[in-house]
Structure formats: structure tokens, C-alpha cells
Amino acid sequence: METWSAHQLYTEAESSLGEAAARNLQAYSEQLRAKGLPVIFSLRHLAELSGVRYWFLHETVNRMREVANYRMFAIKKRSGGRRHIHSVSNELGRVQQWINQHLLQNCKPHAASFAFHKEGGIRQCAERHCGARWLFQFDLVDFFYDVSERDCFNVFKGLGYRPLLAFELARICTTTRLPAWCPRAEFHGEQLRWENIWCEDDLNPVNPNTSRNFPYYERFGRLGALPQGAPTSPMLSNLAAKYLDESLQHFANKNGLIYTRYADDITFSACRLGVARGRVLWQVKDLIKRAHFAVNPKKTRIAGPGSKKLVLGLLVDGSTPRISRETYKRIERLLYGAKQFGFEAAASHFKFDSAYGFHNHLSGLVAFVKDVDRKRWQEFNAVLLNAKSSWGNDV
């Protein structure tokens, strides 16, 4: 992170741009610093801060490097179907890591959002629903893909960055290289209006219709979306879902419910239900739709009194969240397979696409235990490390 004097900035800006522009730059920088955000003046300045070449960022903003920047591949989901992952190029990954570390991680998501930040977590999310007699659970379809570059632009602009830079940051963090079935992968007739955008060099307003430097106005074009696999996507999805969280939190408060969201998993709970179950279902779905997200109807669930209650894989029928016996047995079974026969053979036996995918799944399950049951995690982790040392060439 750069350190410099505001007085030095003002003096140098005044000598080259004039007093009015210098005061604007000073106010802009102080506003960002007050929020704990990095001061970025332009795309060229971002290139210097992140150690990435300016022309590379310029071409990325112009959507000239979509194929070079992202390699997209599909992995099989345990529940069926496939999930598409974007592997980010080294140079784009470097600037995205910088944006995530220095900018996005200094932003606070809504209090009901528990994913992708250090103050959240699966256990903390599940704790909010412990002892509930009623659970209403919803799953969002294609959560990342429903966050468009327009949403990201609004996030960066709302944080205080100048409109042109907000647009450039949004372009750097989104892609038009999406799965063919994704609605955003198709051309559409929506008119994009990027108003009051400033030139990078002279701080004079420009007409978005006539600018040749940056294609931030397209009458019939593609809106980029968040790529699954980019370091900036998780926190950007949280910040872009602020309106969704506020709407659902208001509904929860009004009806005596507890609301949480962990990425695309939405949960409402209550000890005593003061509103009709059907009303909860249709009103929550309507609020989600109004926020431009979509519900997966196959994963909408209601658990009433006497039913088993799971939130993010944790049982919440007691005073604290706990891992189910079935989950423990599954982890033990997978670990035994990896230790005795190796990751390659175990992956084939348990119907995984590859040893790499099996290893990642098993590592994720073991990490899941860490936050809830430290003692069992230590046991599982020791077995996993032993299996990796014995069969390391498999993965």
C-alpha cells in the first residue's frame, strides 16, 4: 500500500491541474481513507499499485482478453449436474488479489451475511438458528452469475470511487465468458447508461456515447458477471446482495423471524410462527425476485416441530450447532479409502471425476469439522495428512 502526504498531493495537483481540481482530488482521497479504503486515482494508478501492466488492464477493461484471462471448465456436483469454474490467468489474478485484499476485505457486508469474510463462518451462521422450532430454507440459483458488472459498478461507486474507475474495476472483476446456458451469456437489448463518467487524465466529463478510449456504453452488448473462481467474486457477491439482505431482514423483523444468508443459502427460523407458512414462502420468493436473484424450487424446504433441522450441514436442535453422525461416518469412510487405497482408487470407487476432485472434496469436509469440533478435526486432519504423504503422487 502506498503512503504519501495529502499536502504533497495537493501541492503537486494544484501546480498541474489548478486549485479546484486539486481540492477535488484531496477531498476524494480523504473520503476513501476515512473508510479504510485504498486511494486509487485511475486505471494507470491501479496498475502501479498492483504491479500489473497498464496495457493489460486497458485491454481487460475493453473485453479484449476474455479467452486469455479465463479458462473455464466444468466439475461434477455431488447433487447432480455440473458446476463451471473459471481459472484466472496469473496477471489478472494478481490485480484481483490486490483488489480483494486491499479494498474488498476492508468492506463490511450486511450483518446477516456470514460467508466470505473473517467475522462470519458456518458455525456462526448456524448458531443464529439453534433451538428454532421452524426453519424455512431457500437456495439461490447461479448466485455469482446473477451479479452483473452493473451491480459491481454500483458497489465500487457506492464505496466512493469515481464513476469511470468504478466501471473499470467492475470490468476487471467480471467476465462475459460464461456457460452457454447462462442467460447473461446471450446478447440482449438492455440499454446500458453509464452517466457522469469522468476522463482518466483531464477530469473533464465525456459523453459515454462517443468515448473511444473505453467501451463503457454499449447499446446492444453483453453484461459481464462474476466468475466462479476469481478472488474478488465472493466478497463482491456479498456487497452486491446488500439490497437483498436488507429486504429479507426487514421481512424477518416484521414477522418475528431470524434471517441469515451464507452465500446462496438463505435461512429463516422461528420458535413460534406468527405468520402463515405459505405467506413466508411466496413473499420471500417475491423479495428475492425483486432483488434480481432466482430461487431453486427443488431446494426450498420447510422443517416444522419434530422434524430434523439442519443449517449448512449442522444440526441446530440444541443450544449449539453440532455435526450429524452421518457426516462423521462419511468423513471416516472417505478417509479410510484414501489412506488404504490411495486417492486415485478411492476417487473411482466413490464415483468422483478425478483424484484431484476427490481430494478437494475430502479436504473441504475435514475443514468443515474444524470450526465445530476441534478434537475430531485434529484426528481427521492427521489421517488426511498421512494419506497425502503416502499417496501424494495421486493428487
Image: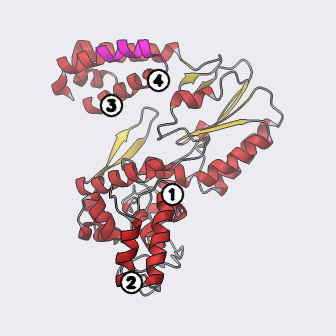
Mark 4, residue position: 371
Mark 2, residue position: 17
Element type at mark 1? helix
**Left or right of residue 264, residue 387 in this image:** left
Residue at the far left in the pictured view: 393
Please identify, in this view, whether the residue under mark 2 or under mark 4 is nearer the observer: 2
Among numbered discs 4 and 3, the one appearing first in the sequence: 3
**Left or right of residue 366, residue 110 in this image:** right
Among numbered discs 1 and 3, the one appearing first in the sequence: 1
How much space separates mark 4 and mark 1, taking CA atoms? Answer: 33 Å
Mark 3, residue position: 360
Please identify, in this view, whether the residue under mark 1 or under mark 3 is nearer the observer: 1
Element type at mark 4? loop
Type of amino acid at the residue the image marks with label 3: Asn
Query: What stretch of residues is rendered in magenta?
Result: 373-383
Type of amino acid at the residue the image marks with label 2: Leu
In the rendered view, would you say 30 is above or below 356?
below
In the rendered view, would you say 129 is above or below 116?
above
